[in-house]
Image (spheres, grey):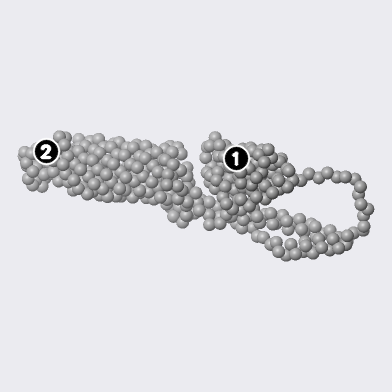
């Protein structure tokens, strides 16, 4: 008996010396502006957008100014398909079509040559608000200047006199959030293409007339922007601080238990053997499987926990309860479905990858919560406990 107590005390002493853990403070997501933060790029299908707009536009400079501004306004339309590469930088292909009547002066008379144009531009877009602010998927207002290069073709109403040229465009877009996948946009833009339709008194004669100019076009449009694929951005964390802190917490608990055990006397009087039979029930401490934002895929570094759970269940024939949760970001119904997918992913991994009988597993899903842990990201979790 004394030999056993001595060996236990020696083991506790060695364990106390070797288990030394410090709490690693996890950097909170969203504490730095976007330009100081690295984000996951997502899949090729994520962060796309489609923008539909309509409005008015007019030609500027030269004899166009002889005509009142309101009389020069004509309809303008655009369709854009683009992709955000970071929360603050995007590129898009912008297709535009508009009436762009050219006014020129002959004597005291201001004449109108009824021209229109179509064009395609490749634009570079910069979200000023996102770039200098902390990332917020629910931000209501964005200011987005843009500039690009393109190709334009202009023609008269009879589709004659086609003119082609390279073009430069620049402008400013204001974006107002309507929902997770839709925005209201208002956009002002200018297009420089230096198309010159120069005419004498007879519009059919193509001779030099310095009074006719239609190289600068401006438009004001509005419409709707639709986001496609994955919408939110996930910040890259160089280390899994949640996992580290969980392991450190377990080490700290073991140290506390060892400290209590070390207070027991080294030796004690011999006690008679008890004849009464006692029944003990094996209870597993709660285990946590952490998930990334808006994901139900189990990371590889969580597999060791599932392995330990499976070994415990098979060794003790003890049923377990698997409960899925999410943090409070997003829609409640969506979060309930996400917590279900997480719980079922863990259950399927235990069954298919680690050989646990399906009869030993009960799954539940609770949706969003902020009650489990103070750190928001830790609530993206599945908890496994003895049933």
The residue depicted at 8 percent of the width and 43 percent of the height is 206
Residue of label 2:
110
Residue drawn at 90 percent across, 45 percent down: 276
Residue in the picture at 65% in, 41% down: 322
Image location (x, y in percent) of residue 87:
43, 49
325 to 304, vertically: above or below? above
| Precedes in sequence: disc 2 or disc 1 | 2
Residue 384 locus on image (x, y percent): 66, 44
- Judged left or right of residue 356, residue 281 is right
Residue in the picture at 54% in, 35% down: 333
* Residue at the disc numbered 1: 344
Please give the label number shown on residue 152: none
Camera-nearest residue between 70 and 152: 152
Q: Callout 2: helix, strand or loop? A: strand
Which structural element holds mark 1?
helix
Where's the C terminus, which quadrant? top right
Q: Is residue 39 left or right of residue 245?
A: left
The residue carrying pointer 2 sits among few (fewer than 14), some (14 to 19) or many (20 or more) residues within 10 Å by Cα, namely few
Q: Residue 383 lies in what quarter of the image?
A: top right
Nearer the camera: disc 2 or disc 1? 1
Residue 72: x and y, percent? 20, 37
Q: Quadrant of residue 25?
A: bottom right
- Determine the CA span between mark 2 and mark 1: 74 Å
Taking the image as shown, residue 341 lies to the left or right of residue 17, namely: left
Q: Nearer the viewer, residue 234 or 144?
A: 234
């Amino acid at each position: 008996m004394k030999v056993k107590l001595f060996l236990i005390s020696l083991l506790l002493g060695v364990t106390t010396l070797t288990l030394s853990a410090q709490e690693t403070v996890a950097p909170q997501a969203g504490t730095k502006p976007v330009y100081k933060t690295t984000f996951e790029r997502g899949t090729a299908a994520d962060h796309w957008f489609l923008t539909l707009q309509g409005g008015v536009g007019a030609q500027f400079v030269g004899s166009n100014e002889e005509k009142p501004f309101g009389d020069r306004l004509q309809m303008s339309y655009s369709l854009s398909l683009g992709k955000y590469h970071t929360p603050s930088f995007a590129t898009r292909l912008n297709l535009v079509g508009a009436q762009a009547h050219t006014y020129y002066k002959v004597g005291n008379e201001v004449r109108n040559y009824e021209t229109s144009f179509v064009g395609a531009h490749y634009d570079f877009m910069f979200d000023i608000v996102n770039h200098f602010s902390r990332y917020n998927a629910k931000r209501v207002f964005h200011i987005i200047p843009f500039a690009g290069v393109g190709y334009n073709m202009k023609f008269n109403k009879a589709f004659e006199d086609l003119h082609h040229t390279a073009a430069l465009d620049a402008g400013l877009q204001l974006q107002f959030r309507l929902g997770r996948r839709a925005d209201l946009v208002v956009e002002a833009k200018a297009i420089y293409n230096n198309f010159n339709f120069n005419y004498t008194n007879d519009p059919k004669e193509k001779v030099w007339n310095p009074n006719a100019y239609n190289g600068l076009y401006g438009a004001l449009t509005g419409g709707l922007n639709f986001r496609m694929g994955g919408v939110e951005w996930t910040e890259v964390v160089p280390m899994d601080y949640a996992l580290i802190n969980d392991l450190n917490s377990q080490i700290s608990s073991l140290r506390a238990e060892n400290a209590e055990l070390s207070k027991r006397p080294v030796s004690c009087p011999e006690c008679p053997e008890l004849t009464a039979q006692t029944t003990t029930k094996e209870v597993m401490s709660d285990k946590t499987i952490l998930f990334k934002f808006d994901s139900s895929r189990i990371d590889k570094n969580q597999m060791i926990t599932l392995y330990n759970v499976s070994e415990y269940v098979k060794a003790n024939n003890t049923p377990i309860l698997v409960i899925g949760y999410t943090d409070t970001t997003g829609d409640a119904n969506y979060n309930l479905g996400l917590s279900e997918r997480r719980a079922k992913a863990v259950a399927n991994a235990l069954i298919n990858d680690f050989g646990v009988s399906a009869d030993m597993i009960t799954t539940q899903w609770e949706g969003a919560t902020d009650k489990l842990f103070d750190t928001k990201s830790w609530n993206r979790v599945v908890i496994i406990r003895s049933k």
